[in-house]
Image: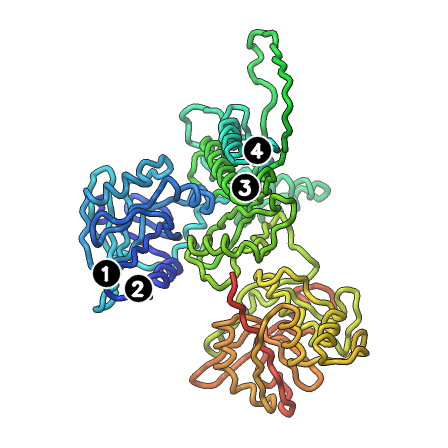
Amino acid sequence: MEDENMQVFIDYSIKQTLLQRTKNLEEGKDDNFLGYVFGEVFPNKIHIIGCAACTESHPPAKTGYPAVPDWKNEKSELYSLIPNGIRLVGIHYSCVKPTNLEPCELKKIFNGTFLKDASVTNNSLVVLQHVNTSDGERKRCFIYNKDLESVSECEWQEASIQGEFLEKRICFRVQASIPLSVSKDQNDTSEITNNIEKTCKELDSTSTAFHIKDCKLLLKNVDHGSDESESCESLLARIELGQEKLQSMHGSGKSKGKQKSAKSVSSSGSLKLKDVLDVRYLYQLTDNNKDEEAFVPVIQYRKEAKSKTICNLALDVVLNLSRDTPLKSLPKLFISALCSQLRKMASVMAQFSKGSSLALVKAHHFKLPGFCHLVTAVYPSIKGDGEPIEDDKLASYRLKLHKRLLLPENRPLMRPSNRYQFENDGQQGIYLTNPHTGLVGGVCGTVAVVDGTYSYHHYMQDNFNDDGWGCAYRSLQTIASWFAHQGYTSKPVPSHHEIQQALVDLQDKGKEFVGSRQWIGSFEVSMCLEHLLGVTSKIMFVSTGAEMRTKGRDLLHHFQTQGTPIMIGGGVLAHTILGVDFNDQTGDIRFLILDPHYTGGEDLKVILDKGWCGWKGPDFWNQQVHYNMCMPQRPDMI
């Protein structure tokens, strides 16, 4: 199909990210913003599902044209962040004057960048031009065909395509432990780089194999010929067959009729795929060729005084591949992803090592807002002097990642504590997280709920009996868990004793308060949040519970801008507000309540069925009692 008939679809979230980046351009000034767009290319359409900023580039050759990415330095960073399988499909740039792009100029730009990269296989590349003038904004879309060396302008459309994109993908997680040997007396990082490159060559050998555990398949790094009929889609059939065999084994003691019934139910249902398929790297030590002629080994011995440090690099890469990817191509794709991460690890080790002391590194995966795929970042975990590296010491390092991925620069989205928890890793801790997920809202009007993850803290947890007096403490613990889950703090959730001691240290209470069973209120909660976590809060007061129905706009604004849980205290009771459903026209309102007075176990069904977490009307509040609400504010940090 001709490029002028090509359709370009941009996911809503990506469009918002790009507009947010370009909406504040100064009039009459060339901002020189340049970014990459990622997605998938089809014969007649291009889907854009991701974007990232270009941080190293050369000035544009002509006014109105994009800058030229320094691809030699850029690709290493991008390939370590974005999963292998997510294609680079073009660029996005801003200018102050509408410009009709010429093929010869785009060829110069693309030839110097990713057209020479073997991983960029698509013929058509998108160029999104954002023009910001005194007359307003204008967005244009061009398609550059590298084979025909032609440019055509086309329309682009907004669409919700991330879900459709993921339905046609399979996510792999490849883990490997690779030993790295470095001389202790080495004062520069060249040896690290050289050894990493040697390791990459060793990985790409016929001795390399990969075990896909979920479907019990072993893939070797050898060429099996040109047969590409078997694709990644076949892995799903293998997994389903394995599940049927397991079900058959469990039902072996039943009658044949019941076994058939169970099998038919299984075959009629859809296969539930895990978030990732786990893959392990294996290295074959023996040779397959038994007919090889016998030989006499020759050993060379050289005595040399040298001190070596050996550390194991824990590689952990994610690939997001189309289901029609040939099965035989997986080993090469796995190796390419491992090598990209190895090179990134070498770069980070070189950056944080001190003299002969080697810094250790670790890869973390993140599920970021606006991204439908995981993003991987390599962080130093141990400094060259052997001391752990605190999150606060890596603010500048994280800031570069935020700028690269066009993330807000005042929220800690990429701290190691924010890393993605895979299904196989299991849920950490003993507390339920986000029990409100799945509850239906929207009965009244606009719904806004807590933004992020929190743990549900309630009476009788932690083998501690606070029934009848500890509800505000538990609400405070829920709020503290929210700040921990979002990466604002690495401190553990405070205990009742620590909360009481904090109030004594602040001279709000006497020494006898520690170890007592005395209540606390919203003001004490706000004082503890600031003292223990450095979090400030706003206090909102209502003279009676009946007045709560008038606070819809305030609560809506809080959850839309701050997104933190709210502690509310009135009379002798405290609760946690997780959201609001408010109609600005009629005044109808409902509150999403998390009740800390629950004394049972961590049974989600009981908690939801009995209303310990659920939507409540305005009559939920005591109409004769005054209430104070502690509304924590997000700190500006990264």
Q: Are marks 1 and 2 in contact (CB under 8 Å)?
A: yes
Type of amino acid under label 4:
Gln
Residue under label 3: 349
- Are there few (<14), some (14-19), or many (20+) residues within 10 Å of tag 4? some
Mark 4 or mark 1, whichever is nearer to me: 4
**Distance Cα–Cα, label 4 vs label 2:** 48 Å
Q: Residue at x 56, y 10 (%)?
A: 291
Foreground mark, 3 or 2?
A: 3
| Residue 268, visible in the rendered structure | no
What residue is pinned by disc 4? 186
Pointer 2 local density, CA inside 10 Å: few below 14, some 14–19, many at least 20: some
- Relative image position of residue 200 (x, y in whole percent): 50, 31
> What amino acid is found at the position of numbered circle 1 in the picture?
Val
Q: Amino acid at mark 3?
A: Met
What amino acid does circle 2 point to? Leu
Q: Give the residue displayed 52% in from the left and 57% down from the top.
A: 395
Q: Earlier in the sequence, mark 4 or mark 1?
A: 1
- Residue shown at 59% from the left, 75% from the top: 566
- The mark nearer the N terminus, 3 or 2, is 2
Give percent across and percent down for residue 422.
59, 50
Q: According to the image, label 1 marks what residue? A: 96
Quarter of the image holding residue 210?
Answer: top right
The residue indicated by pointer 2 is 25
